[in-house]
Amino acid sequence: MDDKNSTWYTVKRFLLIIAGALLMAFDLNTFVHAGGLVPGGFTGLTLLIKECALRFGGVSVPFSIILFVLNAIPAAISFKYIGKWFTIYSGLMVILTGLFTDWMPAMFIQVIQLHDELLSAVFGGILNGAAICLCLYAEATSGGTDFIAIFISEKYRKDAWNYIFAGNCVILLLAAFLFELNRVLYSIIFQFTTTMTLSGMYRGYQQRTLLIITGKSREVYELIREMTNHAATSFSGIGRYEMAEREMLYSVVSAGEVNALVAAIKRLDPDAFINVLKTEQLNGRFYQHPKD
């Protein structure tokens, strides 16, 4: 795990944010623009406001200005309640995405000239998911509704993603009312592809349950505690094959910690029997790494 106070860690976060912002801006100017898509969250709302201003008011408002205004209050809430550096890096992602989207040279935009809405929705969703993953690997977010969801989750211990999904549905309904229904349907494919890409590439918000049968339960528990800061519960039993006493440790850890932890346990106890289960739902106290 990187030292959060090291220069390399800071440089890596900056590079990931810049790469994520560039990729998202490229996606907005190519696949999203070509397919007339409406992404979820504040990005989709920004595009919707921008198009309404142009179509009904004849005013061309820069993408970045609308995005910055929409993110101002959520960013202030995040800075106060979630974390200073987390918000600063997330804000940097928002700023760079807005500026890159407005300033990206036409020569790069013209690389993608698609006339197929389905291809735009699928590949645009993949690029969008990859851009968000880069941002998450930098321990930041792409702003907007992510600020709101994390704030509600950490302050009130409630899952806010259903509310975010409802907000996205409202944006899509407005787009369907104002523009064309097929744009909305392709936008749903775009959002679904984004979600699937995120699920496959980033596992930071997923958990895994470990069932470990070992003769070195105390040492294995200390290892789990040291590597993940998670605890474990032990159960005593009888191994029927050898009719010998055994202990089973039950622990839930973050999905991204599993491979390194299992390898360390096997080095400590080569005879350990480890079953890794996907955790669908978790209630109760679970250690979350601090945002700062």
Image: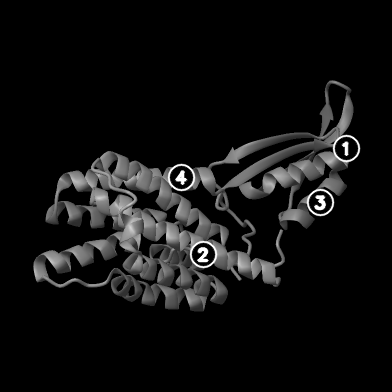
Residue 96 appears in the figure: yes
Residue that badge 4 annotates:
197
Q: Give me the disc on residue 173.
A: none
Mark 3 and mark 2: Cα distance apart in space: 33 Å
Q: Give me the disc on residue 215.
A: 1
**Mark 1 or mark 2, whichever is nearer to me:** 2
Q: How many marks do you count on the picture?
A: 4
Callout 2: few (<14), some (14-19), or many (20+) C-alpha neighbours within 10 Å? many
Depicted 118 relative to depicted 254: above or below: above
In the image, farthest residue toward the front:
107
Side (left or right) of 70 relative to 82: left
Side (left or right) of 227 relative to 98: right
Where is residue 160? Give x, y as percent: 42, 58
Looking at the rendered structure, the kind of residue marked 3 is Leu
Residue that badge 2 annotates:
17
Which mark is first along the chain, 2 or 1? 2
Residue 262: image quadrant is: top right
Residue 235: image quadrant is: top right
Where is residue 269? Give x, y as percent: 86, 39
Figure quadrant of the C terminus: bottom right
Residue 157 appears in the figure: no
Mark 3 and mark 4: Cα distance apart in space: 32 Å
